[in-house]
Image (cartoon, grey):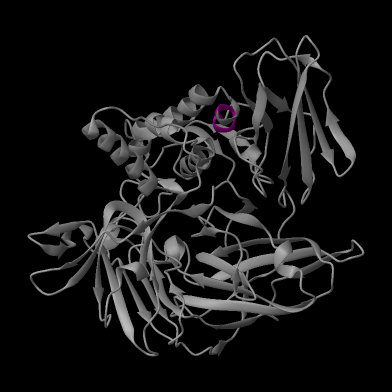
Amino acid sequence: MRITQIEINHLHQPLGFQLPELVITALVSGESYPKLQRRLTIQVDDRIVYQMAWQAASDLTFHVTDLTLTPRTRYQVLVQLKAPDQQTWQQTTWFETGLLDQPLAGQWIGSSRTDLHGIELSKTITVPKGVQNGRLYMTGLGLYEAYLDGHKIGDEYLAPGFTNYNYYVQVATYDVTALLQAAGQHQLTIRLADGWYRGKIGLSQHGGTAAVYGNTLMANAELHYQDAGGVDQRLVTDTSWHAQLSPVTHAGIYYGEDFDATQPATTIPTTSFPQPSKYVVDRLSLPITAHEQLPVKQVITTPRGETVLDFGQNFAGWVTFRNRLPKGAKVSLEFGELMQHGEFYRDNLRSARASFTYVSDGRDGLVRPHFTYFGFRYVRVTDFPSIDPADFTGIALYSDMPMTGQITTDRADVNQLFRNIQWGQKSNFLDVPTDCPQRDERLGWTGDAAIFAKTASYNMDTYQFFTKYSFDMAVEQSLHQGKLTLYAPAVDQPDGGKAVWSDAATIIPWTMYQRTGDTTILTRQFGAWPRGLIGFVNGLKPMVKSSSGLMMGN
């Protein structure tokens, strides 16, 4: 027997996640399982901060209720098991807290210009030799990517995820130690674009509503590191940061993206803003990361003479390509799911533009979108002087959930059906469980999620994904007299209180409990409990009962 893994709140070594109730689970593998005793030890550096006595192991899940976590701290976890013959097994892991109840120390900064769909913020810093424990705590509105000396920080995309931004915004924690090892000057850059926050989203007005949550782009960040003497140093966002136009000139979830690599670095005024969201909290969202890489299966020349790349699989994500274009050349990639009568077909996208345009700077390198995604199998490419299919790669994007279920039979059609289900889940689990990844919708429909939640939980480890989505549902209930809206975040649709759709508020947490045996998601969602739903979000008010239902204190 051996301990194969230790999970912290169903996560592997979580960095900066909300950990309201600490649940530690050991996973074991072996040919036989003797009666065991168990012990849990938690340390900070060499100091033991929690240790339980040896006890009979009725299960291998530890609920730690009497440890007060401190902000920005790494905890080492040791699980030990002991058999009656005194044979022992042990395994270690770690987790690290984010800011907890500490507010971000920086200012919200950006541009007050509402005509801009992309901006960049930057600051030059000087660091000494021997930097340790570099951490970036940051968030942004709409979507952001951060860079140190041109190197992208972290491996996630479309941060900070899709939430009701007026109610809460998530702070992510990034380990930047490796990027700060060279003593001297470094440039920290934050690139921002519209995303769900400011681009068109929702169902109203034939293609969604623009600027539902706000009309200016902004970010808030603080960079921490320890110098060689162990002294903590900090850099925060303020109006001394430099702001300029971005090569991302337009971006939206339905729109796609326009990227002009020749865009001049024109300086614009840096503006500070009051906090745009009611609550700014450590992350709940799993990161949206790149997964499968799909090569071009076929280059199609249609009867109209158009060039279409077939990736052989319908999925959600984008395409990268190697830039071989001369400076100033402009090309476009249009994304679609179907070919009809031999031609590229996109009428099912309704008003979604779903395109990526690129103006070349003449430099060799990989090109990709940054602040959008597409649902597609086929890509119509325009104005490329020549096409080498090896230059193009499809990248599948979805929330980072481990695969947990797989079926292979002697029936090819059954195997294909199961693959279709898996790809359907991957393509629609981008921070919220959407109904579709391609047209002008892509919303977290509660009814769809309720029906699919159980199947999804067998395919992937969805506990944290649905923890975040359950909170999104509860936020909308708190703002709509206890009724659950048809999709969450509700965006532009206040309607709610319908069977099946509203039932998601109970079906999804109950399904997660049944699959894991962990009651935490139930206690978080059940407002009658003393800590309340919002008690697990640092600094937020507890749930209150009202005549119209259980509502969050808002």
**Residue 57 location, x and y as percent?**
71, 15
Q: Which residue is drawn at 23% across and 56% down?
A: 337
- In depth, the one of 364 and 352 nearer the eye is 364
41 relative position to 207: left or right = right
- Taking 354 as reference, is 313 above or below it? above
77 relative position to 230: left or right = left
Magenta stretch encompasses residue 548: no
Image quadrant where residue 486 sits: top left
Write down the region rendered in magenta.
522-526
- In depth, the one of 467 and 257 nearer the eye is 257
**Residue 257 location, x and y as percent?**
38, 71
- Taking 92 as reference, is 119 above or below it? below
**Residue 529 location, x and y as percent?**
62, 26
**Residue 397 location, x and y as percent?**
43, 54
Image quadrant where residue 541 sits: top right
Q: Can residue 279 be seen in this view?
A: yes
- Please identify the residue farthest to the right as the structure is shown: 229
- Is the N terminus in the top left, top right, bottom left or bottom right quadrant? top right
Magenta stretch encompasses residue 524: yes
Image quadrant where residue 366 sits: bottom left
